[in-house]
Image: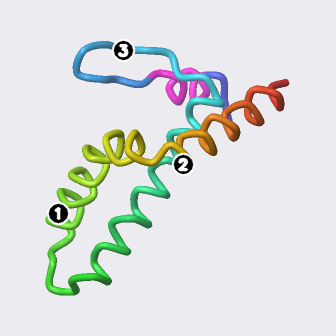
Amino acid sequence: MSREEEIKAAIVVFPEAIVYASPELNRATELARQRLNQLVDYIQTLDSELERHEAIIMAAAILDGLPAFLEGNPDIVTGIKSECQVIRANRQ
């Protein structure tokens, strides 16, 4: 990849700002995109008549309700916190 391509790849445009995205942020964003697509695919297996955009809206609704669900399940929150500690411990 040329230096110009690296610079272009490192700039992300959001409606509210233009920000520099590190390679780590780019990888994390790509992983999140892949997992979101897997969730949308799964939702479409639950209702095969759902159109893709409708399944995406359903995935967004699930994500919207996720914090409340997690707060109602302290064992899951404890597990998430534990995994966060592992991630922090593996920083380089």
Magenta stretch containing residue 5, yes or no?
yes
Secondary structure mainly formed by the magenta segment? helix
Q: Residue at x 60, y 40 (%)?
A: 78
Give left or right: position of 92 versus 67. right
Q: Which scheme is used to colour this image of the protein?
A: rainbow
State which mark lies toward you, 3 or 2. 2
State which quarter of the image contains the N terminus: top right
Give left or right: position of 88 versus 92. left
Could you say where residue 25 lies in the image, as x and y percent from the top left? 57, 30
Magenta stretch containing residue 44, yes or no?
no
- Where 14 falls versus 79 (above or below)? above
Q: Residues within 10 Å of mark 2 (few under 14, many from 20)?
A: few
State which quarter of the image contains the C terminus: top right
Q: Quadrant of residue 17?
A: top left
Q: Nearer the viewer, residue 75 or 32?
A: 75
Q: Earlier in the sequence, mark 1 or mark 3?
A: 3
Q: Earlier in the sequence, mark 1 or mark 2?
A: 1
Residue, disc 2 = 76
Answer whether labels 3 and 2 touch (C-beta < 8 Å). no
Answer whether labels 1 and 2 touch (C-beta < 8 Å). no
Residue, disc 1 = 53
Three-letter amino acid code at the position of disc 2: Ile
Q: Earlier in the sequence, mark 3 or mark 2?
A: 3
Three-letter amino acid code at the position of disc 1: His
Q: Residues within 10 Å of mark 3 (few under 14, many from 20)?
A: few
Three-letter amino acid code at the position of disc 3: Ile
Residue, disc 3 = 18
